[in-house]
Image (cartoon, helix red, strand yellow):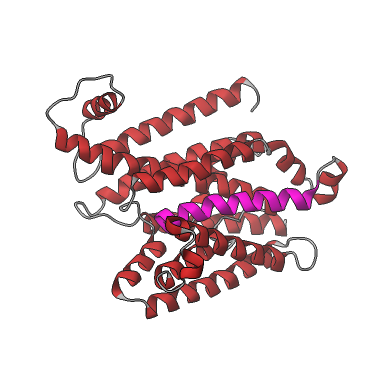
């Protein structure tokens, strides 16, 4: 796909995202008809006079709208992260969960939740940013450890990457489990939140933080499409084309860890989205990162909105954590992708 075809596909993906957002805005404990959603939006922008449905409008503006926006931002983050990490590691089975980013971020956030009151020397200067900051530190440390282990013999081997990811994830999960065991009840419930992944605690400050981190990083990453295409040829060829592969990988790895860690700090661990979405984009017959990166962000946001709608409907009026649904969908798809990759290696 080139030129106009790319633009048309991206317009279709954007339209699908808008429809998914509308469905998410309508669905929940309170059902808002589409006309009412549009009226609330018009009232917020000052385009429509305010009516008598003040309670419903407050529910929409203070609960439903920040949740839907955070959901879309998280999906875009995970979709973009999956495409980016698969390009950086040059294999199609990498995603933030397998590379240790999500579990490392959850461990970092759990440390603040359990020891935040005592570790004032670390958390006091950070204030409300303590949880996202520690999530970033934990995610970056775990990801770099996986990368170093997988590339210890030079070339980043797929099997070594999987084994390193399993080991680091196990260590991080053990640490999170230990913290949950020694935590008080409120702290233990908060840690459980990280492991399941949910948007029920979405609010405007958290949504604004994710947007403030993700959007600038998105613009930076989208400009690296050509560089990632060159990196897919191999580090030697990329260097021959004038790139510094080590610097490129490290810089993008830090940006990737930043966006994933902040999203994880807000909503918890949501697995497999970063793995599935890039392969959905590749079904459009494009592995060009200039298209793959923005399309993965759009499809990731759309998929997450639809999963969140499903989570609100399955056991209504209660809600199912979205991490459970993505794991149920993603686990068999991961096995299928792994079999395809294994067949290609053998053949």
Determine whether, in the image, residue 263 is placed left or right of residue 34: right
Question: Which residue is drawn at the image coordinates 15% and 25% (left, top)?
Answer: 51
Q: Which residues are magenta?
A: 244-269
Q: Main secondary structure of the magenta part?
A: helix
Residue 270 can be seen in this image: no
At 63% from the left and 65% from the top, the residue drawn is 162
Q: Quadrant of the C terminus?
A: bottom right
**In the current view of this chain or complex, which residue is farthest to the right?**
240
Q: Camera-side residue: 333 or 301?
A: 301
Nearest the viewer among 332 and 87 is 87
Q: Is residue 171 above or below residue 133?
A: below
Residue 139 position by quadrant:
bottom right
On the image, the x and y values in percent for residue 260 come to 52, 52
Quadrant where the N terminus is found in the figure: top right
Q: Which residue is depicted at the point 48% across and 57% down?
A: 132
Q: Is residue 63 left or right of residue 126?
A: left
Question: As drawn, which residue projects farthest toward the left?
Answer: 52
Residue 15 in the magenta stretch? The answer is no
Image position, residue 75 (x, y; %): 46, 45
Q: Is residue 127 in view? A: yes
Check the image and report above or below for 12 versus 193: above
Q: How many marks?
A: 0
| Residue 166: quarter of image | bottom right
Q: Is residue 73 above or below residue 119?
A: above
Where is residue 136 shown, x and y percent of the image? 54, 58
Answer above or below: position of 169 versus 53. Answer: below
At 77% from the left edge and 53% from the top edge, which residue is drawn?
Answer: 246
Residue 238, given in percent of the width and then of the height, sits at 81, 45
């Amino acid at each position: 796909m080139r030129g106009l075809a790319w633009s048309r596909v991206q317009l279709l993906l954007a339209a699908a995202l808008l429809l998914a957002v509308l469905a998410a805005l309508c669905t929940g404990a309170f059902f808002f008809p589409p006309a009412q959603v549009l009226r609330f939006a018009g009232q917020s922008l000052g385009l429509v006079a305010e009516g008598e449905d003040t309670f419903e409008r407050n529910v929409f503006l203070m609960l439903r709208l920040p949740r839907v926006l955070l959901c879309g931002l998280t999906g875009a983050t995970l979709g973009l992260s999956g495409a980016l990490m698969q390009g950086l590691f040059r294999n199609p089975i990498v995603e933030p969960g397998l590379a240790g980013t999500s579990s490392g971020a959850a461990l970092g956030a759990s440390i603040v939740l359990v020891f935040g009151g005592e570790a004032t020397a670390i958390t006091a200067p950070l204030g409300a940013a303590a949880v996202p900051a520690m999530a970033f530190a934990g995610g970056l440390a775990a990801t770099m450890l996986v990368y170093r282990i997988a590339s210890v013999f030079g070339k980043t081997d797929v099997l070594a990457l999987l084994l390193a990811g399993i080991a680091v994830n196990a260590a991080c999960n053990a640490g999170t489990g230990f913290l949950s065991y020694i935590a008080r009840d409120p702290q233990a419930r908060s840690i459980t939140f990280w492991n399941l992944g949910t948007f029920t605690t979405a609010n405007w400050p958290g949504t604004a933080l994710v947007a403030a981190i993700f959007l600038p990083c998105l613009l930076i990453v989208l400009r690296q499409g050509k560089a990632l295409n060159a990196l897919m040829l191999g580090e030697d060829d990329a260097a021959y084309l004038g790139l510094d592969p080590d610097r490129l990988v490290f810089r993008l790895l830090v940006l990737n860890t930043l966006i994933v860690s902040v999203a994880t700090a807000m909503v918890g661990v949501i697995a497999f989205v970063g793995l599935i979405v890039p392969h959905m984009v590749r079904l459009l017959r494009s592995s060009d990162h200039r298209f793959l990166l923005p399309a993965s962000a759009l499809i990731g946001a759309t998929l997450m909105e639809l999963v969140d709608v499903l989570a609100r409907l399955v056991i209504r009026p209660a809600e199912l954590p979205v991490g459970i649904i993505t794991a149920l969908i993603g686990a068999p798809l991961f096995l299928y992708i792994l079999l395809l990759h294994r067949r290609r290696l053998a053949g």
